[in-house]
Image: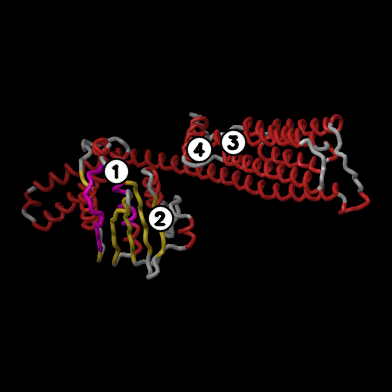
Amino acid sequence: MEKHNDGPARDTGLTERWNAAVSGGRAPGHKNMLLLIQLRWIAVAGQVTTIVIAAIVFGVQLPLPYMLEVVACLVGFNVASHLRWSEQQEVTNSELFLSLLVDVISLTAQLYLSGGTNNPFAFLYLLQVILSAVLLRGWATWIIVLATSVCLAGLALFAKPLPLQLDHSRGIFSLYVQGLLLCFALDAALLVFFIRRITNNLRAGDAKLAALRQRAAEEEHIVRMGLLASGAAHELGTPLATLSVILGDWRRMPAVSKNPDLLEDITEMQAQLQRCKSIVSGILLSAGEARGESSVRTTIHTFLDQLTAEWRASRPVAAFDYYNRIGEDLPVVFDSALKQMICNVLDNALEASPEWLSFVATREDDMLVMSVSDSGPGFAPEILAQFGKPYNSSKGRPGGGLGLFLSVNVARTLGGTVEARNRPQGGASVQMRLPLAALVLEEESADAE
């Protein structure tokens, strides 16, 4: 049995889709780097405030010039980080690691100048460790743990304690205990605030990746359906041609040509046969295998007017309201897939509401908006929740829901959307939105440039 090993190809395609998705927005790593930059600004403000309060309010003797130099270096690093990451969108694990390492070094320098391990704010090391556990890979997290441990041990050995009387017997009135409580409150608040935001970033990235995987699976499903449809169209070509020859022979037979009733039946059969051949040609054209047809330059008004006229003539609809409110008539290129997308939506509306339906085409800025409304029972809530998914249908027959599934994916391929809702006055409405840039002729776009 032949085995297909297309895993790497799928992973490559998924990676390309991921890169394309985050190029227009921000990847989780970039968002996390921006959070670290915000946290560093908070650290700068906190350090300046603490230095001012300790020196002025409590009269603590601090090496202010050196401590302010550390603050200035941290400000310079943060400004450079902000300028860099406002231009570059991709952030690696190593870059996040180095950023956290700078924070550890700056905290160590400030603690060395302000009492070492006797400074209650030494517990801020835990903030760096926990952030590294959330943001970094395993090896980088353990390096941060080792670095903070070494820095803390170095402070215990080399830092000079501040000339403070640490009178623990005073309880909460002790300056050290008050600093400890403030450090704990600051640690807890920053951890809750930033870890929640970081977790939301990671969840958003996972959700986007899951959506891309789902889209890749749906596109693979469409490819399989396209191959089956193309194969079926090829198989149907021969019997349709045979039937066409037989009907032509029958039409020329004297017994038939002299019988008006038989001649009318054969004429109708030939018309229906021609329609079948047209459908087969459309399938092959969508698959890139045209049966002698070529693309025809048309306009948006002509295409929609002809499509609705052909659809209405071949369907038993009692009342069909068509409104073309696009305005300017633009030269465009439409393929059979787009035509089939619109017909699928109209066919579904006709099944739900044979008495009446409407088709309205308008233009909103650079978007072509087509709305199909009916007076049927509307969509069930579970159908709306999974709208556009394969086999999501209330018709209760095999293959139900594939028409809307294909319509959603054709629109998505062109950069558009298909949305459904229930109308307040009853019935349902399906809105197709397509960017005109995907439909306008290439030469017209070039002239406009």
Mark 3 → mark 1, Cα distance in angstroms: 45 Å
Task: Give the colour scheme of this rendering.
Answer: secondary structure
Residue 205 colored in magenta in the image: no
Mark 2 → mark 3, Cα distance in angstroms: 44 Å
Question: Closer to us: mark 4 or mark 3?
Answer: 3
Q: Earlier in the sequence, mark 1 or mark 4?
A: 4
Q: Is residue 418 above or below residue 357?
A: above
Q: Earlier in the sequence, mark 4 or mark 3?
A: 4
Mark 4 → mark 2, Cα distance in angstroms: 24 Å
Question: Closer to us: mark 2 or mark 3?
Answer: 3
- The residue nearer to you, when weighing 317 against 161, is 161
- The residue at the point 63 percent across, 46 percent down is 199
Residue under label 2, please give it: 419
Q: Is residue 448 above or below residue 173?
A: above
- Residue segment shown in magenta: 320-347
Q: Earlier in the sequence, mark 4 or mark 2?
A: 4
Residue under label 3, please give it: 79
Identified by mark 1, the residue type is Leu
Residue 431 appears in view: yes
Residue 280 appears in view: no
Q: Residue furthest right?
A: 169
Mark 2 → mark 1, Cα distance in angstroms: 20 Å
Residue 344 colored in magenta in the image: yes
Q: Earlier in the sequence, mark 2 or mark 3?
A: 3
Q: Earlier in the sequence, mark 3 or mark 1?
A: 3
Q: In the rendering, at what x and y percent does residue 249 appear?
A: 12, 44
Q: Is label 2 in contact with label 3 (beta carbons under 8 Å)?
A: no
Q: Earlier in the sequence, mark 2 or mark 1?
A: 2
Identified by mark 3, the residue type is Val
How many C-alpha atoms fall within 10 Å of the one at disc 4: few (<14), some, or many (≥20)? some
